[in-house]
Amino acid sequence: MERIVRKLIENNKTISTMESCTGGALANAITNIPNASKVIKFSAVTYSNEFKEKMGIPSELIDKYTVYSSEVANMMAKTISDYTNSNYGIGVTGKLKRFDEANPYGENDVVYLSIYDRDNDAYYSERIKLTKDTRIECKREIIEYFINKMLEIIK
């Protein structure tokens, strides 16, 4: 994560996150790095569909693709980038080894991660099949996916 923060600072770029299942773990990992305040603009934890919608995710998109989809993760990433005028928006949605009574569809161990690059109007999406057993370990696994993908993007 240090390399990401350093490269964002060097390139004068900013980042914002809209996280669901990770509950802010990604933003926390970023803000654990010195000088992160130079790059992170905002983070929203939208754990419920209600607050995803309040942040601008259309209910029709959730109804069509389910809240656990790359389409919703992409919209979360773009929406948070637009909302904060950040160069990169990150969207994360999925299930960390648990059944969701409010949203009973989808696999219980799959997470969708999307990085939206506003400057190039490009999405980088990952479907992550979790391999760890605990929620904390799963969050770490998602952060590792993010780090690897982000380092590919920002070079």
Image: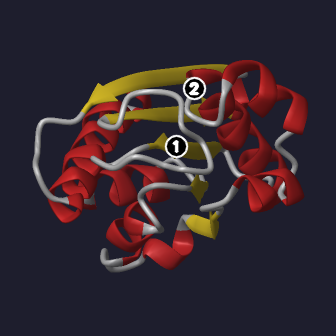
> Whole-percent x and y of residue 58?
88, 37
Q: Is residue 126 above or below residue 78?
A: above
Q: Which residue is mark 1?
A: 93
Q: Kindly identify the amino acid type of the residue bearing the numbered disc 1.
A: Thr
Residue visible at 11% across and 45% down? 132
Q: CA distance from mark 1 to mark 2?
A: 7 Å
Placement of the C terminus among the 4 image quadrants = top left
Residue visible at 15% across and 58% down? 134
Q: Nearer the viewer, residue 37 or 112?
A: 112
Q: Nearer the viewer, residue 67 or 122?
A: 67
> Whole-percent x and y of residue 16?
61, 57
Q: Kindly identify the amino acid type of the residue bearing the numbered disc 2.
A: Ser
Q: Nearer the viewer, residue 12 or 116?
A: 116
Is 130 left, or right, of 108 in this rendering? left
Please, what secondary structure does the residue beneath circle 1 have? strand
Quarter of image, res 22: bottom left
Q: Are marks 1 and 2 in contact (CB under 8 Å)?
A: yes
Q: Which residue is mark 2?
A: 69
Badge 2: few (under 14), some or many (20 or more) residues near its Cα, within 10 Å?
many
Badge 1: few (under 14), some or many (20 or more) residues near its Cα, within 10 Å?
many
> Whole-percent x and y of residue 29?
32, 68
Q: Earlier in the sequence, mark 1 or mark 2?
A: 2
Residue visible at 73% across and 47% down? 81
Placement of the N terminus among the 4 image quadrants = bottom left
Please, what secondary structure does the residue beneath circle 2 have? loop
Q: Is residue 40 above or below residue 83?
A: below
Is 90 left, or right, of 135 in this rendering? right
